[in-house]
Image (cartoon, coloured by chain):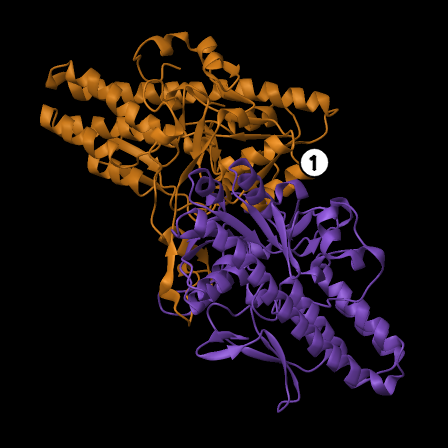
Chain colours: A purple, B orange
Amino acid sequence: MPDMLVNNTHYRTIWFDPELDTVQIIDQTRLPYRFEISSLHTVQQAALAISTMRVRGAPLIGATAAYGLALAMRENPDDAMLSDACEMLIATRPTAINLRWAVMALRSELQSRSPEYRAEYAWQFAAQLCDNDAQACESIGEHGAALLADLAAKNENAVINVMTHCNAGWLATVDWGTALAPVYKAHDAGLNVHVWVSETRPRNQGFYLTAWELAAHGVPHTLIADNAAGHLMQTGQVDCCIVGTDRTLPTGDVCNKIGTYLKALSAKANAVPFYVAAPSSSIDWHGAQTAADIPIEQRGPDELTHVTGVSSAGELLNVRLGGCEVASTSTEFSNYAFDVTPADLVTALITERGTVPASQAGLRSLFPDRFSSQSAYCDG
Amino acid sequence: MPDMLVNNTHYRTIWFDPELDTVQIIDQTRLPYRFEISSLHTVQQAALAISTMRVRGAPLIGATAAYGLALAMRENPDDAMLSDACEMLIATRPTAINLRWAVMALRSELQSRSPEYRAEYAWQFAAQLCDNDAQACESIGEHGAALLADLAAKNENAVINVMTHCNAGWLATVDWGTALAPVYKAHDAGLNVHVWVSETRPRNQGFYLTAWELAAHGVPHTLIADNAAGHLMQTGQVDCCIVGTDRTLPTGDVCNKIGTYLKALSAKANAVPFYVAAPSSSIDWHGAQTAADIPIEQRGPDELTHVTGVSSAGELLNVRLGGCEVASTSTEFSNYAFDVTPADLVTALITERGTVPASQAGLRSLFPDRFSSQSAYCDG
């Protein structure tokens, strides 16, 4: 099964539709209340889809940026447009490295071509990037499923309890997912996998996206408050954690959705293996060298103060939380979107080429080519 | 200022009103949207106020239980009523030790008295318990403020950033609070204190109660997602943590609102002092010996799936979160309300008698009397 199933139809999160002659996405800001497909006709729309998080997840925003450049080149393949489009796309979100690299890699290819060939090349590049991403995620699924099978064997085939964070499922990628790919592969192979899904405040992407994905695929799962992760690990209810990554340093440090670090600390303290599903496209081979070099996105207070839900009358509403009769306006808000988990808290990185220690030596053993040069983006 | 200020009036969280001839509480399920006072006329109403969390916080539910017994004895002071009332109150919530001890201590006094004296004694006991609690909290405030003053001196009187969890302010106690008492004392003494308030899912008691309290008192504060606590500590933005406790073991292990453990792990990893404001009434001197002995309350899924907020039309509404077009019913929910922080993660306990290491030796140095016998509840 190459693509994920929704209402008995197989979907990727982004694709070119030849009939509509444009790019289609699943609008993730509507989930889990509505499953809606949207069209992207321009690079501006692609940029807006990224910045408003209609598409999100490091691999998927990389793919969307590539399609955004293709849309730009279709409109006007000249150098000024190329430069403006790249700038616009890179400015959408600062932390995930896939976005920047997809743009930079494609830009460099396009600059070496004369304008009349640029659009076609960009379309091909974007499509290939999507295929590579899906393939990398599927490989991560196979390598990760082997780890889950080992845990199952040790536990006499009892239920394997996997804790994840945020959404690093197929919705975060083009297909399969990163952290959830091993879960899907293991479940499909007949392992008894159960997933602890933390709601992942403030955007509730665990609740809204991961629980939705797992439900659609029929994988048993339980929603918890983010605060409950420590207690579950402390009381032996978690066999391993698998999370995604928005930017992995060559040292093995992992920048991922805010709260990942707390789960990693708890996993370490309770001897729970903590795996990071890291496609090579998420590794910042030649950029940030330490956590301090990574720009941590800060988002608006509305993610903390407002939430969308369904009223008792069945109406979908956005409501304001908090506020009070006394001096409500004096409350300030802070909303960092990512944190950095030091490599020493990471048991291993699950990459498309295999599972390795979260260290320079570990990564070098699988990706010797990447350490030596500024090589191309995402070759699977 | 003995009592906390709301709309220019001083309030405790619970009191006997001689004119109405009954017990009054602030209905905390209505905050921060409404500030409402409710009457308790019967022990059943007191028990319901505790179980529905109209009153909450370990010290306050102890006080409410004492008033509940007084209401029961006023209705009927016979042995059967006493026994039934105690059973009903103890069954309301399992984790906080104050509740059980207030009931057991008062029960034992009442049993030794003939029925005609019971009501009067119970009223006096409840009033005294409230005064003792307020006094203990104020002492904790003074001891804790000294720690904050030390931090301020070390930091050349820059802003002192205190992180707390859930609500252990005056709303959780009769007056002053436990974790927030040092903040109020320090703020009132002119220190530049700023509080990181984590929303504390799933009930948002940090957001709804702590931010409300701090705003009402004029203490600068910033709301964050629970997930952000690690990043803030890792990046040097937190000078110390102060949290409350629902049950403290004589070993120094601390059972408190779910998520406390994650903050403690992060504090330890980043050398941030982690203080627990622990009135002696929260210490389980002769009960649970290890974390495994503490009954951890599990609450319903509605705390995860539903939230109350204000619509754009200004209407206060309860909305359902999540749910989806695909297989929504397969999502399970788990909602542990407390976790246990091992003593080795706790820098010190701030008690009404002073600040001590979180250990048997530490507690014994201040409370030698409590280790030797089943002594009375909450003598301040």
The x, y position of residue B169, in whole percent, is: 47, 32
Whether B277 is drawn above or below A265: the answer is above
- Other residues around mark 1 within 10 Å, as few (<14) / some (14–19) / many (≥20): few
Along the line of sight, which residue is nearer the eye, A174 or B31? Answer: A174
Q: Is B138 or B102 nearer to us in this picture? A: B102
Percent position of residue B81, x then y: 12, 29
Task: Decide: is A24 above or below A211.
Answer: below
Give x and y (percent) for residue B303: 39, 51
Residue designated by label 1: B236
Using the rendered image of the protein, determine whether residue B220 is visible from the camera's viewpoint.
Answer: yes
Q: Residue placed at 22% from the left, 26% from the top?
A: B70
Left/right of residue B242 with respect to residue B137 in the rendered view? right
> Label 1 amino acid?
Gly
Q: Quadrant of residue A305?
A: bottom right
Q: Is residue B99 left or right of residue A216?
A: left
For numbered disc 1, what is the local secondary structure? Answer: loop
Horizontal and vertical percent for residue B67? 26, 28
A272 lies above or below B303: above
Classify the position of the C terminus of chain A by image quarter.
Answer: bottom right
In this rendered view, identify the residue nearer to me: A341 or B148: A341
For mark 1, name the chain.
B
The one of B340 and A177 positioned closer to us in this rendering: A177
- Regarding residue B306, the answer to whether it shows in the image is no
- How many numbered discs sit on the rendered protein? 1
Q: Left or right: A38 with respect to B19? A: right
Q: Residue furthest bottom?
A: A19
